[in-house]
Image (spheres, coloured by chain):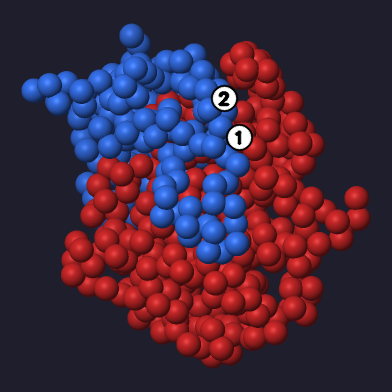
Amino acid sequence: MGTLVEEIIEWGGGVFGEEHMETLLSCVQCGKCTGGCPSGRNTALRTRKLMRMAQEDMREEIFNAPELWFCSTCYTCYERCPKGVKVTDIIRTIRNIAAKEGHMLKAHKMIGVYVAKTGHAVPIGPDQMKLREAVGLESQPPTSQKYKEQVEQVQEIFKTTGYDVLMGLDWDTMALKEEEGEKKK
Amino acid sequence: MSEETKEYAYFLGCITPNRYPGIEAATKRIFKEFGIETKEMVGASCCPAPGVFGSFDMHTWLPIAARNLAIAEEMDLEIYVTCNGCYGSLQEADHLLRENSKLREKTNAILGKFGREFKGTTKVHHSIVILHDVIGLDRLKERVTKPMKDVNVAVHYGCHFLKPSEVRGHGSSETPYILEDLVKVTGAKDVDYKDKLMCCGAGGGNRTADAVQSLEWTRQKLVGAIEAGCDCMIHPCAFCHLQLDRGQAEMEQAYGIFFDFPILFATQFLGLAMGMSEKEVGLDAQTTKMPEKLLK
């Protein structure tokens, strides 16, 4: 395993291109990102500090801080950075690496369960079907949740990329493995 | 294809069809009024949420988004959306896959397992941009039969409608104009307020990570709009709608404060100004009451 910076460039670079991720090295700690950050005024998230900590390879400190997950990906920092640091995409990449190392909230894993079951992060229920009918729409939209074979395509993606393993999905019960463990206790 | 018979594939996403179908109904109705036909994307899934799936595993986020794009390509149609999350996710994926052939090959190796392929032949549009740029302000204005007289509006953009501006292409994210123009068309007044460009608080998994903390952003946003004398908030995003509307019920539970401040997706507001009924634009699903002056 290389440094966090190397890992960010490699993992994020695989999607956004390495140059995009290498902007992390251009951060001069001016603080414009933190000044405009809506999370920063409400939570302990300090984007400037996070960029520095990433440069300094402080992976455990970053991964164990709850505020890593308090960025709403609003892109204000990304837009305003005078050095062109792609802050939001760097944060998303750091989160990816944190998740790979087991730092993922259960509530976040659950979103994956809904998608594995229906293709949707927010699936439909009986009450919402009535709401649809009330505005003159079909009770169920023709999206993945309506068709088994379409959901299976999303499941195939999970299996191929290993997302099922990442979140700890049990395909037999369609629940999180950690949840089952809790039930047995 | 003439402008009068333009057709789009509607990428529904999750929140619009599954929580606020009024957004879907109002948007389809208005588009139909102007000769724009909507085709459903059979089998489309979650976009998937860019700040959520993109934060957990971007190498899973991308093929799921690409699969959705491929569905529209199979229909030979361009896409419209009613959620900034969907807009961000699909447009970003389309952009990345068009630019990077290696990434496209890798992604298509996954989609090929079930006979799909990303070719780069569709385009991703926001429904609100279609209203503004394709239908156009003049044609919209002609159809306003119930002007929003004396209505003060707080415009809320959300985040991924404008940003990253290098991909979205709607000009500077600091000086937006699209929603302001649409508000003016209805006869309402667009009012500046504190934190106008601030996020609703929901995105990036923030709502899921800590709901009460995320509602604090929402609270600040709504207080700014209320203090500026606004009657309602108009926005282009189903996910923001969930946070700003349903969030008010959650805030009542968390803080014991109920703002009862109306939140409307832009086509719901425009629909009312065009004489559509409360039912037709789906106000039944709203957490808040609608003030009389928006309805008469």
Query: Image height check: is A114 above or below B17?
Result: above
Q: Which residue is mark 2?
A: A149
Query: Image height check: is A131 above or below A94?
Result: below
Indicate the quadrant containing the C terminus of chain B: top left, top right, bottom left or bottom right. Answer: bottom right
In the rendered picture, chain B carries what hue? red
User: Which kind of residue does numbered mark 1 sit on?
Assistant: Gly
Viewer-proximal residue among B13 and B102 = B13
Residue at the farthest left position: A185
Label 1: how many Cα within 10 Å (few below 14, some 14–19, many 20+): many
In the rendered picture, chain A carries what hue? blue
* Residue B255 picture location, percent across and down: 18, 66
Q: Quadrant of residue B123?
A: top right
Residue in view at x 19 percent, y 61 percent: B254
* Lateral position of residue B39 relative to residue B251, left or right: right
Circle number at residue B43: 1
User: Which kind of residue does numbered mark 2 sit on?
Assistant: Glu
Residue at the farthest top position: A1
Give the total of numbered labels.
2
Mark 2 or mark 1: which is in front?
2
Residue in view at x 69 percent, y 25 percent: B118
Do the CB atoms of the residues marked 2 and 1 lie less than 8 Å apart?
Answer: yes
